Image (cartoon, rainbow, N blue to C red):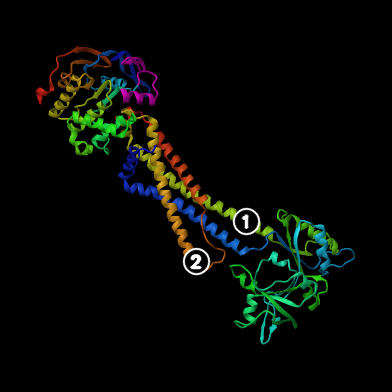
C-alpha cells in the first residue's frame, strides 16, 4: 500500500487538473470545518452555562410556603402557615438520604429598601439567618475572618459574614472590617468574616451583596420565633432529589395540616431537574452539531464521489491498457480508492486545521474582551478530532467505492475500443 | 505454442447475433512470425482478442504453451496476460503522463518486481529498440515511430511467450512502418513468437507465414518467403 510508485501516480492524477481537485477538496474542507465550528460552539455554550452553575450543589431543592387553596380539617382556605425549626429534625429522621437541610430566614430581597446602616453609609442587602451547613450548598470563598459555626448558633451570637459587595459599599478602602459593627434593621451585628462567591455572569454582583448571620440570632433579633422562611435541601449522591421531593412535600403537608391535594400550598424549586434539563440541552446541541456538520460533510463527499466517477470515465482507456498489460482488477480498485481517501483526508485535515485556528482566534478574542454571558472556552476534544478523521477515512472509502467498482466493470477490450 | 480448435464467437446485436468466428482451427509453433490478413469485419481482431485473453470464445479450445485457457476470472486472466502475452496496439496506447521508461516498466510493476531491478530491465529493452536516450521523455515528446518502439519494448519487457500486434503500422507512414517491421523481424530472429494482424499486403509479406481470414473462416494458410523490411528503408 505504501509504495512509491502508487503514491507518485496518485499525485500525478490529482495534480493534472489542479482547479478541479481544489474545488472538490473544498467541499470536504467546508464540511469538516462546519462540523468542528458547530461542535466547538456547542461546547462553548456548555462550558459557559456550567460555569454559571458554579459549584452549587446541584442535587438540591428549595421549599417555601404559600397560602392554602383548600380547606382541610376545619382550617380555612387561604390560610398562611410557616415551617417550624422542629420540621428540620423530623425531615432528618425520616429521610436518611438527605445530606444537608438548611432552614433559612431572609430579610430584604431584590429591590428592597435600605436595611443596613454603618455610620453614614446605608445599603439594601439580602440578610440571611443561616446554619453553618449552607456553605456546603452555596459554596463561597472566605476571604478574611471565618464563617458561622455551631457555637454561634447555640449562643445566638449577633455576628455577620458579609460579601465583598457589601464591604465595598459600607467600608472605605483599606479600612478594617473585622470586629466592626453594622446595624441591620436597627440591631447591631459584628462583622467576623468576608466572603466572595464564584460566578461569571451578572448574578455575581447580587451574590456578593449578601449578609449571613446565625439563624438563632436572626430569629431572636427580628422576632421570627421558631418559624422557618424556606429550606435548602440537598440529598446524598446517588439519591436524586427529584425522586424524593414529593415525599418530602407530603410530609410537610401532613405536619402542617394541609389538604393532600392542595398543590399550591408548598412552593418548591427543583435545581436538580433544572440542571438535568440543561444537561439534556447540551446533548441535543451536540446532536444538532453532528447532524448538520455530517450532512454538510456528506455533500462534500458526494462531490468527491462525483469527481472520481468523472476521473474514472476519463481514464477508461488507460485502465483498459493497464489491464491488458496485466494489472489485476483489485489493484486498479485499490488505486481509485486510495486516490479518493487521499483527497478526502488531505482536505479534511485542512478543514480541521483551519477549524482549530478559528477556535484559537475566538478564544483569543474572548480572553482579550473579558467573559461573555453563557459562552466560555469553545473547544473540541481530541476524541472529536479523531472521530472526524475516522468519518473522513470511511467517507473517502465510500466516495471511492462506486467509481472504483465502475472502473473495473468495464472490460479491457471495451475500454481499448473507445477511440 | 498456440493451439486453437474449432473456435466460435458471436456478438449479440439486439435481437440477432452476429457470428464473427465460425470454427477456426489454427496452430502456431515456437518462433514463428505469422500475419493474420483479412478485410475489416473478417474477424481477425476478434481472433487476436481471444488469443490475447481480452475476450472469450463461445465454443472451442485454446491452448497456450500447453496450458488450456478457459474459465478465467479477471484476476487470473490479468495474471496470464502479464506473464504470457505482450500487446502492441495500432494507437500505441502508452500512458501519457508516464515517461517512456515508466511505460516500459509497467508490466514488471504488475509483477511486483522491485523498483531498481524493474528500471534496469526496462532500460535494457529501451536500449534494444534504440531509445535509450529518450527514456525520460513523455510520449507526447516522441514521434509516432518512437512511440511504437516504446510500445514494442513494453510488450517484450516481461519476456512473454507470444507477442500480439494489432495493426501495429496502421498509424505510421510507410518508411516508419518498415523501420518498425525491421525491429519486429529482428525480435523474431531472436526466437520470439509473433502474431501480426494487418490488412496491408506488404506488411503481411514481411512475415514468414500468412493466414487469410474471410467472414470468420480461414480461407488460406501459407508459408511465404520473408521480405526483409530493411531492403525498403
| Residue indicated by mark 1 | A279
- The CA span between labels 2 and 1 is 26 Å
Residue B52, relative to residue A240: is it above or below? above
Quadrant of the snapshot with the C terminus of chain A: top left
Q: Position of residue A32 (x, y in %)?
A: 46, 51
Q: Is residue A315 covered in magenta?
A: no
Mark 1 chain: A
Reading the chain from its start, which is encountered first: label 2 or label 1? Answer: 1
Looking at the image, how many numbered discs can be counted on the residues? 2
| Residue indicated by mark 2 | A367
Q: Quadrant of residue B23?
A: top left
Q: Residues within 10 Å of mark 1 (few under 14, many from 20)?
A: some
Mark 2 chain: A
Q: Position of residue A122 (x, y in %)?
A: 67, 83
Image position of B109 (left or right of A301): left
Q: Position of residue B196 (x, y in %)?
A: 22, 21
Bounds of the magenta segment = B56-83
Q: Quadrant of residue B153?
A: top left
Amino acid at each position: 500500500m505504501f509504495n512509491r510508485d502508487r503514491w507518485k501516480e496518485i499525485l500525478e492524477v490529482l495534480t493534472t487538473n489542479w482547479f478541479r481537485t481544489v474545488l472538490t477538496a473544498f467541499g470536504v474542507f467546508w464540511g469538516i470545518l462546519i462540523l468542528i465550528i458547530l461542535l466547538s460552539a456547542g461546547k462553548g455554550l456548555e462550558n459557559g452555562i456550567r460555569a454559571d452553575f458554579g459549584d452549587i450543589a446541584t442535587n438540591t431543592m428549595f421549599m417555601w410556603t404559600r397560602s392554602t387553596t383548600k380547606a382541610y380539617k376545619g382550617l380555612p382556605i387561604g390560610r398562611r402557615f410557616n415551617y417550624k425549626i422542629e420540621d428540620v429534625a423530623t425531615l432528618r429522621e425520616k429521610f436518611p438520604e438527605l445530606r444537608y437541610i438548611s432552614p433559612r430566614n431572609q430579610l430584604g430581597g431584590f429591590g428592597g429598601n435600605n436595611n443596613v446602616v454603618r455610620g453614614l453609609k446605608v445599603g439594601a442587602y439580602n440578610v440571611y439567618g443561616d446554619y453553618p451547613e449552607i456553605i456546603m450548598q452555596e459554596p463561597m470563598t472566605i476571604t478574611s475572618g471565618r464563617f458561622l459555626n455551631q457555637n454561634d448558633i447555640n449562643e445566638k451570637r449577633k455576628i455577620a459574614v458579609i460579601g465583598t459587595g457589601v464591604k465595598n459599599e459600607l467600608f472605605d478602602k483599606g479600612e478594617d472590617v473585622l470586629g466592626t459593627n453594622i446595624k441591620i434593621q436597627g440591631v447591631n451585628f459584628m462583622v467576623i468574616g468576608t466572603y466572595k462567591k464564584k460566578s461569571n455572569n451578572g448574578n455575581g454582583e447580587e451574590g456578593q451583596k449578601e449578609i449571613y448571620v446565625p439563624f438563632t440570632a436572626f430569629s431572636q433579633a427580628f422576632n421570627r420565633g421558631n418559624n422557618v422562611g424556606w429550606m435548602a435541601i440537598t440529598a446524598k449522591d446517588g439519591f436524586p432529589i427529584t425522586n424524593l421531593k414529593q415525599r418530602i412535600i407530603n410530609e410537610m403537608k401532613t405536619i402542617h395540616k394541609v389538604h393532600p391535594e392542595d398543590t399550591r400550598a408548598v412552593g418548591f424549586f427543583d435545581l436538580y431537574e433544572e440542571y438535568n434539563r440543561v444537561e439534556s440541552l447540551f446533548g441535543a446541541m451536540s446532536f444538532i452539531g453532528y447532524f448538520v456538520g455530517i450532512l454538510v460533510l456528506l455533500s462534500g463527499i458526494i462531490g468527491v464521489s462525483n469527481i472520481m466517477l468523472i476521473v474514472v470515465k476519463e481514464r477508461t482507456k488507460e485502465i483498459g491498457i493497464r489491464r491488458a498489460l496485466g494489472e489485476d482488477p483489485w489493484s486498479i480498485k485499490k488505486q481509485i480508492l486510495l486516490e479518493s481517501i487521499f483527497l478526502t483526508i488531505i482536505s479534511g485535515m485542512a478543514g480541521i486545521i483551519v477549524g482549530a485556528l478559528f477556535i484559537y482566534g475566538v478564544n483569543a478574542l474572548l480572553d482579550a474582551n473579558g467573559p461573555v454571558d453563557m459562552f466560555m472556552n469553545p473547544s473540541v476534544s481530541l476524541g472529536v478530532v479523531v472521530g472526524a478523521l475516522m468519518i473522513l477515512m470511511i467517507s473517502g472509502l465510500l466516495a471511492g467505492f462506486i467509481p472504483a467498482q465502475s472502473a473495473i466493470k468495464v472490460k479491457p477490450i471495451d475500454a481499448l475500443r473507445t477511440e | 505454442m498456440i493451439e486453437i480448435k474449432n473456435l466460435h464467437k458471436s456478438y449479440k446485436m439486439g435481437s440477432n447475433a452476429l457470428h464473427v468466428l465460425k470454427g477456426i482451427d489454427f496452430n502456431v509453433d515456437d518462433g514463428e512470425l505469422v500475419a493474420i490478413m483479412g478485410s475489416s469485419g473478417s474477424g481477425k481482431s476478434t481472433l487476436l482478442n481471444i488469443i490475447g485473453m481480452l475476450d472469450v470464445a463461445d465454443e472451442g479450445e485454446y491452448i497456450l504453451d500447453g496450458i488450456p485457457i478457459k474459465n478465467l476470472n479477471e484476476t487470473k486472466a490479468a495474471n496470464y496476460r502479464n506473464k504470457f502475452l505482450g500487446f502492441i496496439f495500432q494507437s500505441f496506447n502508452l500512458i501519457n503522463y508516464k515517461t517512456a521508461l515508466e511505460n516500459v516498466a509497467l508490466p514488471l510493476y504488475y509483477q511486483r518486481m522491485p523498483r531498481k531491478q524493474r528500471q534496469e530491465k526496462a532500460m535494457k529493452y529501451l536500449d534494444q529498440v534504440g531509445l535509450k536516450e529518450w527514456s525520460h521523455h513523455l510520449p507526447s515528446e516522441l514521434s509516432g515511430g518512437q512511440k511504437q518502439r516504446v510500445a514494442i519494448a513494453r510488450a517484450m519487457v516481461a519476456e512473454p511467450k507470444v507477442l500480439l500486434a494489432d495493426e501495429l503500422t496502421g498509424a505510421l507512414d510507410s518508411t516508419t512502418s518498415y523501420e518498425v517491421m525491421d525491429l519486429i523481424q529482428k525480435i523474431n530472429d531472436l526466437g520470439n513468437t509473433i502474431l501480426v494482424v494487418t490488412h496491408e499486403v506488404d506488411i503481411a509479406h514481411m512475415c514468414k507465414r500468412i493466414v487469410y481470414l474471410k467472414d470468420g473462416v480461414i480461407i488460406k494458410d501459407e508459408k511465404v518467403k520473408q521480405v526483409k523490411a530493411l531492403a525498403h528503408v
